[in-house]
Image (cartoon, rainbow, N blue to C red):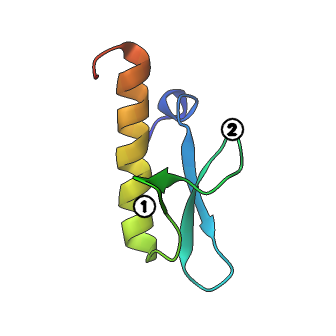
Amino acid sequence: MSDERKQFNRYAMRDDGTGKWAIYDIFTGLTAEINGVPQDGLDEVVAEYMVRDLNEVYIARRKGTTH
């Protein structure tokens, strides 16, 4: 991912202390939730894909291309 694109991201991942991964909101520091489900306890590869997908949706929403 380019440095230019990274500046628009909202989500990142971190070790959740159990050897699994959590997705968090870089603005609030809180664990991200999807439909009320905290995104923690994830395998690393799953977390990587989720972060990518969440950031793509966030970027598209900021551009006004999604509803």
Taking the spot 35% from the left edge, 25% from the top edge, the residue there is 60
Q: Position of residue 61 (x, y in %)?
A: 38, 23
In the drawing, what numbered circle is on residue 2?
A: none
| Mark 1 or 2, nearer chain start | 2
Residue 15 coordinates in the image, percent (x, y)? 63, 72
Q: Which mark is residue 27?
A: 2
Q: Look at the numbered disc 1 and give the secondary structure of its residue.
A: helix
Q: Amino acid at mark 2?
A: Phe
- In front of the other: label 1 or label 2? 2
Residue 45 on image: x %, y %? 38, 70
Q: Residue furthest left?
A: 66
Name the residue beneath numbered marker 1: 48
Name the outermost residue toward the top. 64
Camera-nearest residue between 40 and 11: 40
Q: Tag 2, which secondary structure?
A: loop
Q: Is residue 14 left or right of residue 52?
A: right
Q: In the picture, which quadrant includes the N terminus?
A: top left
Distance (Cα) linking label 1 and label 2: 18 Å
- Residue depicted at x 63% and y 86%: 18
The kind of residue tagged 1 is: Glu
Rendered position, 38 above or below 6: below
Q: Residue at x 46, y 56 (%)?
A: 36
**Quadrant of the rendering where the C terminus is positioned:** top left
List the single residue furthest toward the front: 36
Dot 2 surroundings within 10 Å: few (below 14), some, or many (20 or more)?
A: few
Reply above or below: 10 against 39.
above
Query: In this rendering, is residue 48 above or below 2?
Result: below
Rendered residue at 39%/56% (across/down):
50
Number of numbered markers: 2
